[in-house]
Image: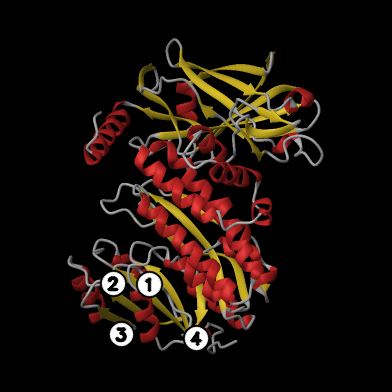
Amino acid sequence: MTVNGSGILTARVGVIVIGYNDAAHIGHAVRSALAQGPAVAEVIAVNDASTDRTRAVLDRIAAGEPRLRVIHRPVNSGGCGTPRNDGVRAATAPYVMFLDSDDVLPHGAAAALLDAALRHDAAVAAGLCVRRELPRRRDTPWQAPLYRRPAVHDCPERHPALLRDTLCVNKLYARAFLAGHGIAFPEGAFRYEDFVFTARVLAAAPRVATVPDTVYIWHVRRDADRPSISLDRERVSNWQARVRAHQHSVEVFREAGSAPLAHAARVKFLDHDLRMYVRELPGHGPGYRRAWWRVARDCLASYDEADLCAARAPARWIARVVLATATPRDLERLAQLAARPARLLPPYAEAAGRAVWATDLPQVLLDGLTGPGAKPARRLPVTVDAELRPRTGARTELRLCVHDLYGRLTAARPHTVDIELRLRDGKAVLEHTVPLAADDSLWEAELNLDLAELARRGRRPADAPQAWDIRVRIHCTHGGILRAAVRAAGNDMRPVALPSARHGLLLAQPYATGGGSLALRLAPGVRCATGVALRRLRRRVRQNTPW
């Protein structure tokens, strides 16, 4: 391992920062790369023909920093691949990393990856990426199971889970390895270019070292005027681009003679990509739905039964429904099945003693629910409906309804439910255990909540609202404990202003998350409640939709 006299890694890394019309953030990105310390030999910033102040920001930093080189492209490339390729061609350091203009590298990221690459003679080193939702700073680890402990993978074919992390930004690459195998990003206006780049890298069979360190902070700005590619899913062209990138990746593996990696890529697409877009289908119009469905069917037509069976049950059931019918159907039911955790909504159908999607689609088998090889009760996609009903003062009633599933819960005999309210972005937790009352094929429970007490437990800065997620654990006599998120039921999701002896005013609103789960937003105090109302108004104005 190459170190200096103090045992510190010498400068071996080039960080390539790309940006387009992002003067507000690119300076922070570049400075985070320069602040990596002696491991970084150079930072190459590629300005993709920006029309804002990006050029001036970069030139000003470069004037006082000899390690920073700036490339100003004369014409915008239309994507991220071309500027990254420009950066690699300009690099002189033996290793390269990639950084987007609106993200940052945490302290020590380059050193951690370089140390792993040198220690294990690995052409690729990878670490944990954290998705940080702004402005709330809610952090979510990306593909965390891959980075729980240090590891070395000599053959990607024997570790197909590596395909689940298609990001290129949380990794370090040996430049000689990329050049020796002719690996580059797709040029021009190619969206999801990192899918194809990652496929090309893994198809070349590098040694991959992974570290548990956080090496990349991915900033998610949902209220940005220009959303990122991963968030801009309002048009069906985004889905078409994602499918195109996926199919190109599969072809890369096939051309390399790696059937196991091609299979793993298809399974990853089912488990992650397909479920993510299906969750959002009910929110789109008829034209989008029809176009999305056609693209999905054409893509899935190339899958075989081995691909479907290797995916998790919710994903393969969804794929079978899409393949079975030429037009969109059962979208709300599919979206709930695509949620995490999955929820299979009634009605439940059977054909020839087998669990199927519907009586008119008997070919869509819901394998694993009944018969030999059935899932244990704790892994069933049980639906738990929940509704919040205001009562007197700051109290509200939480009503739960647990649905049976092909008689499996009846056999398991549920008797009590643990209700957990967990503060998002915080450590506060409130737990209650209540009995379940059987009613035919349903089980019901009720809990009275003191919202003022809940707000007190989730004490935050005065101008910060609280978001509480609701989870349940169902205790069964046979089958152990079943964990689930509750589905938002009922039509009344309006905010309610409640009197509060402690806060004066408490604004409470139940709402459905993106996956359809019930959550509760609290805004304690006049100042906080007013701030929430103003933010809602500004968001509505931006979206140009009625209040």
Q: Earlier in the sequence, mark 4 or mark 2?
A: 4
Which residue does the image show at 46% across and 58% down from the upper left? 243
Return the residue nearer the eye: 408 or 105. Answer: 408
- Give the label, 3 or 1, closer to the camera: 1
- Give the label, 1 or 4, closer to the camera: 1
**How far apart, in angstroms, are the residues tagged by discs 2 and 1?**
8 Å
- Give the label, 4 or 2, closer to the camera: 2
Residue 283 lies left or right of residue 56; in this view the side is right
Q: Say which amino acid is labelled 3.
A: Pro
Q: Which residue is mark 2?
A: 77
Q: Which residue is mark 3?
A: 66
Neighbour tally class for label 3: few under 14, some 14-19, many 20 plus, Cα within 10 Å: few
Q: Are marks 3 and 1 in contact (CB under 8 Å)?
A: no
Q: Are marks 2 and 1 in contact (CB under 8 Å)?
A: yes
Q: Are marks 4 and 3 in contact (CB under 8 Å)?
A: no
Q: Say which amino acid is labelled 2.
A: Ser
SS at circle 4: loop
User: Which x, y percent locates residue 108?
Assistant: 49, 70
- Mark carried by residue 81: 1
Residue 494 lies left or right of residue 2; in this view the side is left
Which residue does the image show at 64% across and 27% down from the upper left? 348
